[in-house]
Image (cartoon, rainbow, N blue to C red):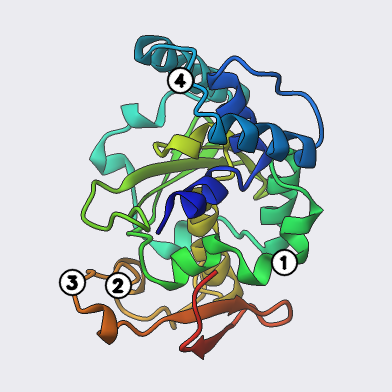
Amino acid sequence: MDNTDNAFEEFSTIGKLKDFLSARGLQCMGNKQQLVSRCFVAWESNIPLRYSEQEQLSKLKTEYDNRLQEANIDDPRSLKDDDWSSDVKEWPKIDLGKIYSFILSKKEQDMDFIGHYKTQKAYSYYQSGIVDTVFCATLNGSQIIKSHVTPSQSVRNEPHDVWLTVNNENEIQVSWCSCIAGLAQTCNHVIAVLYKIQFATNMGYNDPSCTSVPCGWNTSTKKNVQPCRLSDLNLRRDNRSKISGTCNNNFNEHLC
């Protein structure tokens, strides 16, 4: 992947655009097209970061604390291992409507994302098996979901930590991811975890009366990526069906 591809990924959401500009002390106001233009000018001009690593860490901690305050919860990282359950039947019931309501409420994606969601990377992340076991717990009256998501371009690196909160109406409140784009709340890793929960909802796996959950399904969705020759790669495009939520695999196509 060349630098242009990396730049496109970094500029894919309004949240990422604003983070890029803010870190360089540049204006963050305007619509998405204006932000994209401003970011590419800054990128091509190699405008350096304005804030030191210490200042960025301080900003990260402040934003993390604000996220906890917004959800009115204690830090999920304070929960013990015994507090978490991998039982799919304890997951909240999240459908596509709730996922897109959450995305749009954060104002980090525009309607173009919804209109082209069948080819967005987040679904291919889930379908490719880089979402690890999903755990859930209860904290301060909210349901907490957590998982690990393998970096899509660096599968040997440490996975990203993802957590999100869901209220009693199964509405997604806030989210957090340890990736660079995690401040934006709707990075591909967060949405990939939500797609896994949505799939379970669509299949009825998280219904307390369900007796047909495939054995080990929650853990088996995580795949071990083995090195291979480029000529042996089987590239595909994972499409999300608007009607059934199933996946149409068109092989030998480059994944967008």
Q: Which residue is mark 2?
A: 220
Marks 4 and 1 close (CB-CB < 8 Å) = no
Q: Amino acid at mark 1?
A: His
Query: Secondary structure beneath disc 3?
Result: loop
Query: Secondary structure beneath disc 1?
Result: loop
Could you tell which of marks 4 and 1 lies nearer the N-terminus? 4
Q: Amino acid at mark 2?
A: Ser
Residue mark closest to the camera, 3 vs 4: 3
Q: Which mark is residue 227?
A: 3
Could you tell which of marks 3 and 1 lies nearer the N-terminus? 1
Q: Quadrant of residue 92?
A: bottom right
Could you tell which of marks 2 and 4 lies nearer the N-terminus? 4
| Residue 207 is at least partly visible in this image | no
Marks 2 and 4 close (CB-CB < 8 Å) = no
Could you tell which of marks 2 and 3 lies nearer the N-terminus? 2
Using residue 68 as the reference point, say whether residue 242 is left or right of it: right
- Is the residue 198 above or below the residue 238 in the image? above
